[in-house]
Amino acid sequence: MSVHGDITAADPALATYAQSEAPEPRFGPELGQRLFVLEAVYEGYLLHYGTPRRFEGMDDDLRLLAGDALYALGLARLAQRGDLPAVAELAELISSSARLHAEGRGAEAEGLWDASASVLAPT
């Protein structure tokens, strides 16, 4: 199943708002199994702070709830695999991104996503 399909399958209610064509993943295949997780968490971030790539037509409240659901989905997948270093990396990324937005420095958050993708890529 594609990353897009996995994300919309996570909650049937989200499928109602899924865009018909899946965008290209933001992060590369070098992330391996972590690709789905980073894509899901990034989409959650976009639902909170930007323009989502995979969903449309949600009101602000539903966007926040859907974003939270995608954060939880990604972190739960990592935890199920026992990938605690990746859980810690993404928890810090989510927290740091939120802090930057609260401080009015949201534009700086994109660089954090690239840095975390580099950390999460297997060596």
Image: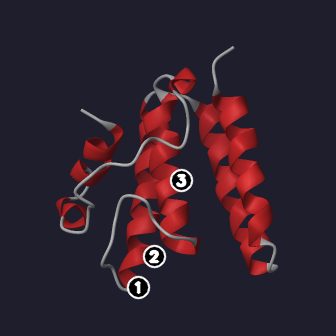
Element marked by disc 1: helix
- What is the spatial separation of the Cα atoms under label 2 and label 3, in whole angstroms? 13 Å
Badge 2 element? helix
x 64%, y 25%: residue: 121
Is label 1 in contact with label 2 (beta carbons under 8 Å)?
Answer: yes
Q: Which mark is residue 84?
A: none
Q: Quadrant of the C terminus?
A: top right
Horizontal and vertical percent position of residue 107? 76, 67
Distance between the Cα atoms at labels 1 and 3?
A: 18 Å
Of the 4 image quadrants, the one containing the N terminus is top left
Which residue corresponds to mark 2? 64
Q: Is residue 119 left or right of residue 23?
A: right
Among the 4 quarters of the image, the one containing residue 94: bottom right
Residue 122 picture location, percent across and down: 63, 18
Count residues near mark 2 (Cα–Cα under 10 Å), then give few for <14, some for 14-19, many for 20+.
some
Q: Label 1 amino acid?
A: Asp
The residue at which mark 1 appears reads as: 61
Residue identifier under label 3: 42
Please determine whether, in this image, residue 40 is positioned above or below residue 15.
above
Question: In the current view of this chain or complex, which residue is farthest to the top?
Answer: 123
Q: Does residue 10 appear to the left or right of 94 in the view shown?
A: left
Which amino acid, mark 2? Answer: Leu
